[in-house]
Image: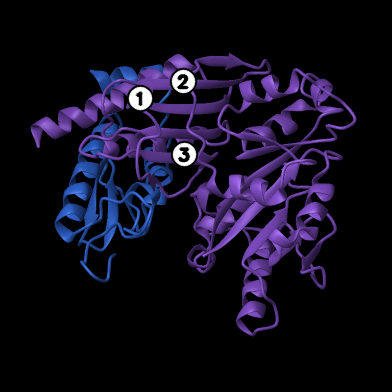
């Protein structure tokens, strides 16, 4: 969590890089940070929908994934998102799998 | 932040000769060197310590957080010596001999909790031997060499005085269209190091090259502005599943809502912080992404990319 703005996602993952010279960042203000986090959650949830997994945050302190049976996985960095999602799903999530893409498209 | 440059290349391809040239050049004074091959660390030719290939995982399940513990410790030791005033250097070169794949070292620089605030990636230089490379690239040992070439920011041609190899630059450009090609013998070593550090060659617009053995480089060009959030979700998902087969991704993106382009640069599962460029290099505002990959169907890649962009746009209109 970011000590300054109290928002998750300050782990300097490349998709949410900390604002600094020369580096593209959307974390330019607490509002922009929240908007980006919300947009990311929407896209991730869409990507996880075929697996009936949802993504969100847990008390604004960690990320949380919830599976269809209520099982959850809590983690702190975006780096871990897909590994945790695959562990929860019990299978690979392959964005090049035509069947996955068909379900995503539908 | 101290730039750390990786020097790699196939056995006998001239890495050490290039390193010697670098260390002998006044323009490269202040270079600390870690040499993996002999298990030694040389700093300004005097300080020696040992490194191994210990691998640690920062957190189970996440392969992009792999850390080579001894490499990390060696760099930290160098920085500590500098802090004590016992060593003066402003860049580090790691000769990755014996590590066919530069990715674990790059990952270490990025994932280590202390190193990530002390050092930054200074690019990958891959030496390519003009005498043996043409045959080797079509021989049985080529997979390892191809991966090293694919990871390069600079392809440093060696032994060019011994063989002309007129077809080699074309062969290499087809394999890694994003790398700069320089002559390790005649070009200045400072230029070679700088080109590696900058590592921001604008990807070309050429289409698809097939290199056999399932290795391809493909360029995707996009007319529409890119949704950054959807792009990030897509690429992280893609690299999580296929990072070991995506040897390189490099691109320049025209993002929705941004005037200036953003450069993307990744090696396998590691993506460097996106670079916000000061201006477009030319009039062409189309986004382009180059992928160097093994056994991945470019049409599926494109379908997947387009679908995630569509999702990003849909989410935007419904939010």
Q: Nearer the viewer, mark 2 or mark 3?
A: 2
For label 3, the SS is helix
Q: Is residue B21 left or right of residue B220?
A: right
Residue sitting at the far left: B318
Residue visible at 38% across and 29% down in the picture: B282
Does B157 sit left or right of B2 as displayed?
A: right
Q: Chain of mark 1?
A: B
Kind of element beneath mark 2:
loop
Q: Is B88 drawn above or below residue B130 in the view shown?
A: below
Q: Which mark is residue B284?
A: 1
Distance from the alpha carbon under mark 2 to that under mark 1: 10 Å
Q: In the displayed structure, does residue B222 sit left or right of residue B150?
A: left
Residue B206 position within the rendered picture, expressed as x and y whole percent measured from the top left: 50, 17
In the picture, one chain is blue; tell me its letter: A
Residue B101 is at least partly visible in this image: no
- Which color has been applied to chain B in this rendered view? purple
Using the rendered image, report if marks 2 and 3 lie on a common chain: yes
The residue nearer to you, when weighing B28 against B72, is B28
Q: Which corner quadrant of the image does residue B37 belong to? A: bottom right
**Residue at which label 2 appears:** B205
Circles 2 and 1 on the same subunit: yes
Mark found first going from the N terminus, 2 or 3: 2
Give the residue at x 65% y 67%: B75
Badge 3 is on which residue? B240
Labels 3, 1: one chain: yes
Q: Quadrant of residue B212?
A: top right
> Disc 2 vs disc 1: which is toward the camera?
1
Of the numbered discs 2 and 1, the one sitting upstream in the chain is: 2
């Amino acid at each position: 969590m970011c000590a300054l703005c109290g928002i998750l996602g300050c782990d300097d993952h490349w998709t949410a890089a900390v604002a600094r010279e020369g580096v593209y960042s959307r974390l330019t203000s607490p509002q922009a940070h929240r908007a980006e986090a919300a947009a990311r959650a929407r896209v991730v949830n869409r990507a996880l929908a075929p697996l009936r997994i949802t993504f969100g945050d847990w008390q604004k302190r960690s990320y949380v994934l919830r599976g269809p049976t209520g099982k959850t996985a809590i983690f702190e960095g975006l780096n871990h998102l897909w590994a945790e999602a695959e562990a929860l799903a019990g299978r690979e999530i392959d964005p090049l799998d035509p069947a996955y893409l068909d379900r995503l498209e539908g | 932040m101290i730039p750390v440059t990786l020097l790699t290349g196939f056995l006998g391809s001239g890495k050490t000769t290039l390193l010697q040239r670098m260390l002998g050049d006044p323009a490269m004074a202040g270079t600390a060197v870690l040499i993996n091959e002999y298990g030694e660390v040389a700093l300004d030719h005097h300080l020696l310590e040992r490194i191994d290939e210990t691998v640690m995982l920062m957190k189970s399940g996440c392969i992009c957080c792999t850390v080579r513990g001894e490499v990390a410790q060696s760099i930290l030791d160098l920085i500590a010596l500098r802090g004590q005033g016992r060593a003066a250097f402003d860049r580090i070169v790691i000769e990755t001999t014996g590590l066919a794949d530069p990715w674990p070292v790059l990952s270490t620089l990025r994932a280590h909790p202390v190193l990530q605030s002390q050092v930054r990636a200074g690019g990958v230089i891959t030496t390519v031997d003009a005498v043996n490379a043409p045959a080797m690239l079509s021989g049985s040992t080529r997979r390892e060499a191809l991966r090293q070439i694919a990871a390069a920011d600079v392809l440093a041609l060696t032994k060019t005085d011994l063989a002309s190899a007129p077809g080699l630059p074309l062969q290499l450009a087809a394999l890694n269209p994003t790398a700069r090609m320089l002559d390790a013998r005649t070009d200045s070593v400072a230029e070679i190091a700088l080109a590696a550090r900058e590592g921001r060659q604008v990807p070309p617009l050429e289409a698809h090259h097939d290199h056999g053995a399932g290795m391809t480089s493909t360029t995707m060009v996009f007319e529409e502005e890119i949704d950054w959030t959807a792009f990030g979700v897509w690429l992280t998902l893609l690299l999580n599943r296929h990072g070991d087969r995506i040897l390189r991704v490099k691109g320049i993106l025209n993002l929705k809502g941004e005037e200036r382009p953003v450069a993307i640069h990744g090696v396998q599962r590691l993506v460097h912080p996106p670079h916000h460029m000061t201006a477009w290099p030319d009039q062409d505002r189309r986004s382009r992404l180059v992928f160097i990959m093994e056994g991945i169907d470019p049409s599926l890649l494109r379908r997947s990319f387009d679908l995630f962009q569509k999702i990003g746009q849909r989410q935007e209109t419904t939010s």
